[in-house]
Image (cartoon, grey):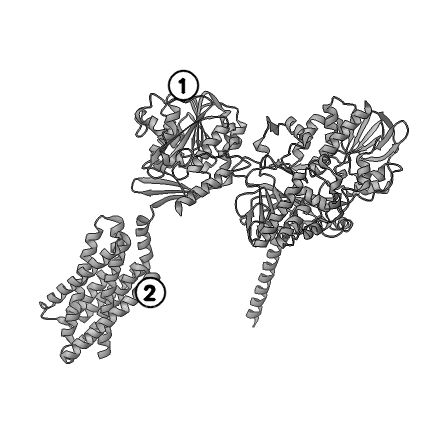
Amino acid sequence: MGILLFITVLLIAACGLIYELVAATLASYLLGDSVLQFSTIIGCYLFAMGIGSALSRYIHRGLAYRFVWTELMLGLIGGFSSALLFLAFAYTQGFALLMYALVIVIGVLVGLEIPLLMRIIRARYLFRDVVAHVLTFDYLGALGASLLFPILLVPRLGLVRSAIFFGIVNVAVALWSTFLFSSQLQRTRALRIVSCVLLCGLAAGLAQARRITAAAEDNIYADEIIFARDTRYQHIVLTRFKDDLRLFLNSHLQFSSRDEYRYHEALVHPALAAIPAPRRVLVLGGGDGLAVREILKYPQIESITLVDLDPEMTRLFSRYPMLTALNQKSLSSPKVHIINEDAFPWVDATSDSFDFIAVDFPDPTNYSLGKLYTTAFYKAAGRHLSAQGLMVVQSTSPMFARDSFWCIAETLKQAGLRTYPYHVYVPSFGEWGFIIAGLREYQLPTSLPAGLRFVDTGGLAGLFEFPPDMSPLAMPANRLNDQILVRAYEQDWKDISH
Amino acid sequence: MSISRRRFLESASAALIGLSVKSDRRDRPIPGGFVNDAFELGHKLRDQSSFPASKRIVRLPVVIVGGGIAGLSCAWRLHKRGFSDFLLLEMNAQAGGNSRWGENEFTAYPWAAHYVPVPGTKSRYVRELFEELGVLVAGQWQERYLCFSPQERLYLFGRWQEGIEPAIGLSRSDRDQFRRFQDEIQRFRASGEFTVPMEVGFSTRTAELDQQSFSSWLRSKGIDSRIVNWYMNYCCRDDYGATSEDTSAWAGIQYFASREPEEKGPLTWPEGNGWIVRRLLERLGNFVHTGQMVHRIAVDKKAVSVFAGDTKYEARFVVFAAPTFLAPYLVLGMAPLHDFEYSPWLTANLTLERLPDSYGGDPTWDSVSMESPTLGYVDATHQSVRTHPERTVWTFYWALAQGSPSENRQLLLARDWRYWQEGIIRDLERLHPDIRACISRIDLMRMGHAMARPRVGAIFSHERQHLRKAPGPILFANSDLSGFSIFEEAQYRGVIAAERVLDLLG
C-alpha cells in the first residue's frame, strides 16, 4: 500500500513537470527567445501551483473524490496541451494567451494535487513521515521527468506525443486511485467509466499525433505545398502561404506572387516601351505567362511566340485557376503561340524576326543551362531582331552574383550587341539585374502602359545606375567551349552562403 | 509430409524462376554486330586470289589510291589548284578511312578519329582548309565547332575530376615530376623542332630521341611516379595505340611539345572528323569512286597501270594514299617493308536510351577511367545546343596496346562480336553499374591496322625517309610516312603529294 502511494506521488510529480517543460519548449521553438520563454513559463507555473495549494484549503469534504477529478482534468488538459498549442499557433493569433492560460490552469491543478494527497493519507502515517515521504518522491519524480524529457521524450516521441503520454499516466493514476482510496470514495463506478473514456481518447490522440503535427507543421514551417510534379525536364513545386503563391523549379525560387510584378514589369517595360511600333514578340523561357501578361498591355502587338521547353509548365499556367488568376489568362490569348521546344535549336531553326525578344531562362546553374548564356546563343538570337528590335536578358543578381552579371553583359557585347544593364529590387530575390541588348542605340521610353505598379517613367533612369558595390567588373565572355559563367555563378553564390 | 514437400518444390521452382529472371536481365541480348569489317577484303588482297581480268582501260594523268584524309586532301588540293583530270579509288563502300562516321535516327557519330586540336600557325594547310569550311572565320574559330564545356573528365580514386591529367590525390613528388616534365617539354617546344606537321621542324638533332622508348626516356629524367607514368602511357595509347614502353621517345615528346593552342579546343563535331570528310565529299564527290579495290599496280616506262575491279587505269602518276604497308602487296616488284608497324583498334558505338543514373556530374564530352585498359568514351550529342538531350550515342575507344600487334589482330579476328560487346559493358559497369539497362544497341568496328605505331626508330627509319621522297611515278601520301596517324599529318602528306604531282606534270 505504502510504496504504491509514493509511486503515485512520483508519477504525478513527473506529469506536472513534463507539462511545464512541454509548454516552455514549444514556446521557445515557435516564438524564439528561449530564456524569456522558460523564465516566464516556470514563473507562471510555480505561481499557479501556489494558487492551487492556497485553494486546497477551501476543499473540506470528498478529498479523494476531488483528487481523482483533479487527476482526470490534468490528464485531459495537460495531455492535449501540446497539440492544442501547435494548432493554435498555426491557425489562430492567440497562441501566447492560450499558452499562459493553459500553464496557469495546469499549474493550479498540480498545486492542488499534493496538499489533497497529503490530507488523504495523513491518518495513515505520522505527519512528519507524510511530509518527508511525499516531498521526497515529489522531487524524485521531478528529477526523473527532467532527465527523461530531453534524452528520451523529445527525440523519440516529440512534443505532442510526450504530453499525451503523460496525460495517459495522469488518467491511469486517477483510475488506480479509485482502487487505492476505494474506502474513502463514493460513485467509484462513474469515476472508473470516465477514466476509461479519457484513456481511450488520449490513446486515440497518441495514434493521431502525427497527423496533428503534420497539419500544424505544414502551416508553420513550410508554406503549404499545393502542387508538386516531376516532369521530364524539372521538378515543379507550387507553394502557398496566405496570399503568397510561390513557384520553385528544381527548388530554385522563380517568383513570389507578392512581388513578381516588380520582376516582370522590370523585365518587359523598359525595353518594350522604347520600341516605336512593336508587332511581333518572342519570349524564351517564361512558361509562367507572367512576362506575356505584361507584353499584352501593348495593344499594337499582334503576335507573341512563347518558347518554353516544358509542356507541363505551360499547361499548368494555362489551366490552373489560381495561376491563371495571376497571369490574367495570358497564355490563352489568341495572340500567344506556345511552342514547347528547346530554345537554342528552335532559335537556330526559325527564320522569323521579332521586334522584342525577352530572354527569361533559369540561372546558369549547370553547363546545359549555361549554353543559353553564350556568345553563340546571343548571336543566334540577335539575328532575329528586326531593325527597331531590342532584346532583354534576365541576368541574375548584380549584387549577389556580380561576376556573373557582368560576364553576361560582356558576352552580349562580344556577340556584337550594344548593352544597357539595369537593376531593380525584388524583395523575394533581392537586387536583380537585366540587360537590354540590341543592334541599335537604346533610349529611355517616354511613356508606359497605364496601370503599372512598379515601373514609371520618372524612376526609369535611376535603374540604369549602379552603385559601387554592383558596379561593372571586367569579365571575359562566356563561350560554348569555355563556360566561365557556370563557374563564376557557382563561386558567387558560394561566397554569399559561406 | 506431402505438404512440406510441395512447399519445398514450390520454393525451389520460385528460386529457379528467380534465377532465370535474373539471368534474363543480365543476358538480355543487346543487338549489334561488326560494321565496316575490312578483314576479309584485306586478306583477299594479301593472298592475291582471283581478281577479274580487266575489260576496259581508262587513261588519265593522276590516280589517287585510298580515300582517307590523305587521299581526299590530295584531291582537295588538286581541285583547288584547278586540276581536275584525276580519280580517287577507295576500297570501302564509304570514303573517309579513319574519319568514317555512322548515323542513327537522332545523331551522327564517329567510327574513329573524332577531333582535331585547334591548329597552330605552322599547320598552314589545315588552317587553309578550315577557312574554306567556315571553321576559321576572320581569325576567329567558330564557337560551335569548338568542343563545348565541360570537355574532359577522369575517374580516379572513386570520383570524377575535370580534365584528363590527374590533378587530385597527387603527392608532392607527383606534382614535382609533372612540373619537371612540363619544363622539359617547354624546352623542346621552344626549340621549334617539334611541330605539326612534323616535317616543318624535323631535325636530325632530335634523332637520338628516336633511339629509345618514351618510358625509358621518362625514367632517365627521374620521372618514376606511378600516376605521372599512367598519364604518359594514356597519351601514347590514345594518340598512337601503343604503350609508352612501345613508343619512341621522339613521338612521346612530339605529343606534348608540338602544340600551342591559341583557343580552348579541340575542334569536334557529332560525327567526329567525318564532318570534314562530308564537307570534302560535297566538293569532290564526283572524283571519288568507292567500292573500288585496287589489286595491282604495275610501273612501266610509259605509265603506271592501276588495276581495280575489271578496269585498268593508265596514269602518269599515282598517289598512294592508302596505308603504306599495303603497297608491297600491290606494286609489282616492290621490296617488302620492315619499319611499318600498326596498332590494332576496336571502336564501338553504343546507343543509349538515357544516361545512367550513376553518370555523375554535368554531361561531358570525353570520359576516361584511370582503372580501365581502354581509352574511355566520347558523347556524340555533346556538340548539340540542346539543354536536355535524352538519347545519345557513346563512342567507345579501345586500342589493343598491350602485347604484340599481330597477336592482338588474331584475337580481334578470333572472337565474335558478343565477346567484345560484353567486355565493353563490363568495363563501363565499373564506372556506371546501371549502364547495361540504358543501352539499346552496340555496334563494333575492328581495325587490324588502325594507326601507324611510332615504335623506337620508326620516325628516323631510312625506309620511311626514302618513301617520303619517292621521286615518282608513285608518290606516297599516307600519314604513316610521318610515323603516326593523325589528321594533320594525313592532310599535309596529301596536300604536298598534290603539289609535287602538279610540279611533275609541269
How many callouts does the rendering have? Answer: 2
Contact, mark 2 vs mark 1 (Cβ under 8 Å): no
Q: Chain of mark 2?
A: A
In this rendering, position of residue B383 left or right of residue B112: left
In x, y percent, where is residue A432? 38, 35
Q: Chain of mark 1?
A: A
Please name whichever residue, B452 or B4, is drawn nearer the observer in this view of the structure. B452
Please name whichever residue, B407 or A238, is drawn nearer the observer in this view of the structure. B407
Q: Do dots 2 and 1 share one subunit?
A: yes
* Vertical arrangement, residue B93 with respect to residue B368, above or below: above
In x, y percent, where is residue B367? 59, 46
In this rendering, position of residue B151 left or right of residue B241: left
**Residue B137 appears in the rendering:** yes
Question: Which residue bears the numbered disc 2?
Answer: A151
- The three-letter code of the residue at mark 1 reads Ala
In this rendering, position of residue B415 left or right of residue A414: right
Q: Secondary structure at mark 1?
A: loop
In x, y percent, where is residue A84? 25, 55
Residue drawn at x 68%, y 44% is B253
* Vertical arrangement, residue B130 with respect to residue A69, above or below: above
In this rendering, position of residue A348 left or right of residue B274: left
In x, y percent, where is residue B95? 73, 34
Please name whichever residue, A178 or B308, is drawn nearer the observer in this view of the structure. B308
Density class for disc 2 (Cα within 10 Å; few <14, some 14-19, many ≥20) is: few
Alpha carbon separation for disc pair 2 and 1: 71 Å
**Residue B432 appears in the rendering:** no
Residue drawn at x 24%, y 78% is A3
**Quadrant position of the N terminus of chain A in the picture:** bottom left
Q: Earlier in the sequence, mark 2 or mark 1?
A: 2
Q: Quadrant of residue A68?
A: bottom left
Question: Which residue bears the numbered disc 1?
Answer: A277
- The three-letter code of the residue at mark 2 reads Ile
